[in-house]
Amino acid sequence: MYILDDGIRLNAYLDMPAGNPQKCPLVIVIHGFTGHSEERHITAAARTFNELGYAALRVDMYGHGKSEGTFRDHNLYKWLNNAMTVIDYARKLDFVTDIYLCGHSQGGMTVMLAAALKHDVIKGILPLSPATMIPELARRGELLGLKFDPEHIPDELDAWDGRKLGGDYARVAQTIRVEEAVARYHGPVLLVHGDADEAVPIEESIRAAKAYDNARLVVIPGDTHCYDHHLELVLGAIREWMPKVKQ
Ligand code: FER
């Protein structure tokens, strides 16, 4: 199925909990940079939400997975607008009671920003290994392990896998203030992060957990950015936390 955002088709999967309840809460699940909705950790999170009685709406963001738009032209404003559109789509679904946001890495930061904008309609958020250092790296000219002049951003950057990323990605990222977004969301937050994450330092989640009003951080010992060793501990953290959110 597709969700239309300003003429761009976003590929999405709606996974319903067993028994097809007439009403249930829904979790929007967003992948990371270069990722998509069929990655192992994304489908596993969605399945866990289903097992707990929540619907899951996995969405490929602009320029990723089977959505329209090119990887080169994606940026955080586009993803943030995608997220707001998906939230409004979810609000119009008859069966949906409450809406939660879960995102991995760049998708984790996206849900933090979207929760700030839609704080009154988002019941809780689950940023997994959120890539909240991207704006500061962009301001320093150090994205993607490259060095560039942050005042004269090149038209194109080389992403990890040889793909090209437009310089506007970095121009947009430089303007994002994560701490302002954190201050605008007062609902419950579950952060999960591996302490051997090679892409996003765990300090990002430690800082966010302290800055949010109402956050819990679960550290996964020895685990990587995509939970190669202990995905079951990530799912266990979700299983433990979700039912505790006040109805
Ligand atoms: C970077 C480090 C991490 C970066 C992006 C990420 C664009 C995002 C990772 C992810 O979403 O998995 O320097 O630059």
Image (cartoon, grey):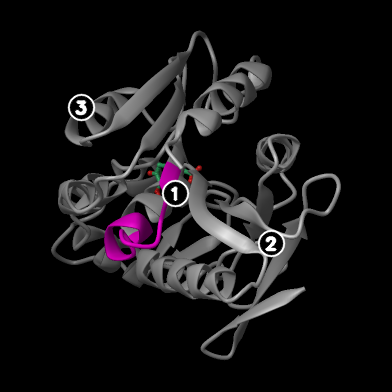
**Where is residue 20, by image quadrant?**
bottom right
Give the distance between the C-alpha atoms of the residues marked 1 and 3, in whole angstroms: 20 Å
The residue located at (41%, 30%) in the rendering is: 191
Dot 3: element: helix
Dot 2 amino acid type = Gly
The nearer-to-camera label among 1 and 3 is 3
Residue 117 vs residue 10, the one in the foreground: 117
Residue 40 screen position, x and y as percent: 73, 37
Ligand 1 is found in the corner quadrant, namely top left
Dot 2: element: loop
**Residue at mark 1:** 106
Q: 23 above or below 183?
A: below
- Which of the labelled discs sits on residue 210, or is there none? 3
Dot 1 amino acid type = Gln
* 10 Å crowding of disc 3: few (<14), some (14-19), many (20+): few
Dot 3 amino acid type = Lys
Residue 215 vs residue 77, the one in the foreground: 215
The residue located at (38%, 41%) in the rendering is: 131
State the extent of the magenta-drawn residues as a range: 114-125
Residue 10 screen position, x and y as percent: 64, 74
